[in-house]
């Protein structure tokens, strides 16, 4: 059920959009109201999650176990795995954000004959994740041509670069193929590998099905079930300018695509997809490990009321004397000399 429930949910979303447009003529609702509502939820949720993370106290630098810290001059420190400077942190963050460095170093544990435990690199996961994210970014940037007039030069350049492998009219976008292939691999990995399948939840499958539904509806609109692109651009530019109008004859498939996009936007801040923003607020990544160079004091340390031994001895002096316990000070307050031999009587 943890696989079929998200699939049924995505199919239900498709059915809701189709029924709403085809049967109830709710083009305005699905073309204007839903996108604006999704954008408001997305921005509000994004701000909420970021503020919630920002309020989390991080009084000390969290030391990572990988790489040598900066210690003595003759010991070489790891400037990227364990940076002690801002430049090192920027380098570590750049490698993490652009190339998923921690995922590249991910290993897989396997029990082999013997029995023997072995750790293996899992480069296919890293490659699929990298391809998926860059293909998604390329598609997002390409879609700017629907919201801008004139279309920026870099969008046209990306469009030509993405469609240079032209084997049909319209051009076949490589990012579409890569996105579907990578998302399919990530899905198959969750159902083929028993350990991954065991720990996978409906929240892991739902975004994959949702993105596959988005990609499928987009590909269908571009290559098989043609829609009125001019009318779509009139609607999207109106949405961007906050003067929306719904032209006639756009096609139901576009509303399905737009509805799935809206659901993804509204779902984003409250899901695991929010790692897009969380990586920037991760203390293990964005803080320099200079614990051995600087003293970090807890900023909310409160004064602690202590009871010193002198105060304790003064309070219980009579009882200690009666019990024959040794005292540090005489009744006059003079400190008894320590380390001197006891006087012989």
Image: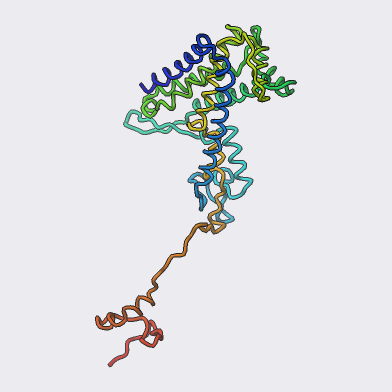
- The one of 161 and 239 positioned closer to us in this rendering: 239
Quarter of the image for the N terminus: give it: top left
Q: Nearer the viewer, residue 178 or 110?
A: 178
Rendered position, 291 above or below 146: below
**What colour-coding does the image apply?**
rainbow
User: Quarter of the image containing the C terminus?
Assistant: bottom left
Q: Is 248 left or right of 54, judged from the image as shown?
A: right
Coordinates of residue 159 in the picture (x, y in percent): 68, 18
Question: What is the x, y in percent for residue 244?
Answer: 65, 20
The residue shown at (57%, 36%) is 96
Q: Compared with residue 253, is residue 317 higher up or lower down, i.e. above or below?
A: below
Residue sticking out furthest to the left: 323
**Quarter-of-image position of residue 190:** top left
Residue at the spot x=62%, y=42% of the render? Answer: 90
Residue 321 sits above or below residue 220 on the image? below
Q: Quadrant of residue 8?
A: top left
The mark tally for this picture is: 0
Q: Relative to the observer, which residue lies in front, 249 or 338?
A: 249
Left or right, 186 with respect to 74, comes to left
């Amino acid at each position: 059920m943890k696989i079929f429930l998200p699939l049924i949910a995505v199919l239900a979303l498709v059915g809701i959009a189709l029924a709403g447009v085809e049967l109830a003529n709710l083009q305005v609702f699905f073309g204007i109201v839903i996108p604006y509502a999704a954008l408001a939820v997305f921005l509000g949720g994004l701000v909420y999650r970021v503020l919630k993370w920002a309020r989390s106290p991080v009084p000390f630098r969290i030391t990572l176990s990988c790489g040598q810290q900066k210690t003595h001059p003759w010991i070489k420190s790891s400037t990227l795995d364990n940076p002690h400077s801002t430049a090192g942190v920027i380098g570590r963050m750049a490698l993490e954000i652009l190339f998923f460095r921690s995922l590249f170093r991910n290993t897989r544990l396997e029990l082999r004959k013997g029995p023997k435990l072995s750790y293996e690199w899992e480069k296919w996961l890293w490659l699929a994740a990298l391809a998926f994210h860059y293909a998604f970014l390329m598609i997002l940037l390409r879609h700017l041509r629907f919201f801008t007039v004139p279309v920026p030069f870099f969008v046209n350049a990306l469009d030509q670069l993405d469609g240079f492998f032209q084997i049909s009219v319209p051009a076949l976008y490589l990012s579409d193929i890569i996105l579907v292939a990578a998302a399919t691999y990530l899905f198959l990995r969750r159902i083929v590998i028993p350990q991954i399948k065991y720990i996978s939840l409906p929240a892991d499958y739902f975004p994959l099905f949702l993105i596959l539904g988005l990609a499928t509806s987009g590909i269908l609109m571009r290559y098989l079930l043609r829609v009125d692109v001019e009318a779509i651009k009139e609607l999207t530019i109106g949405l961007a300018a906050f003067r929306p109008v719904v032209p006639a004859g756009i096609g139901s498939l576009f509303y399905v695509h737009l509805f799935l996009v809206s659901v993804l936007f509204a779902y984003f801040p409250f899901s695991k997809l929010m790692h897009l923003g969380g990586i920037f607020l991760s203390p293990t990544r964005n803080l320099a490990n200079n614990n051995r160079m600087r003293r970090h004091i807890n900023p909310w340390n409160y004064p602690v009321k202590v009871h010193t031994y002198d105060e304790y001895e003064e309070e219980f002096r009579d009882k200690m004397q009666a019990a024959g316990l040794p005292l540090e000070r005489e009744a006059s307050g003079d400190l008894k000399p320590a380390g001197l031999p006891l006087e012989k009587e």
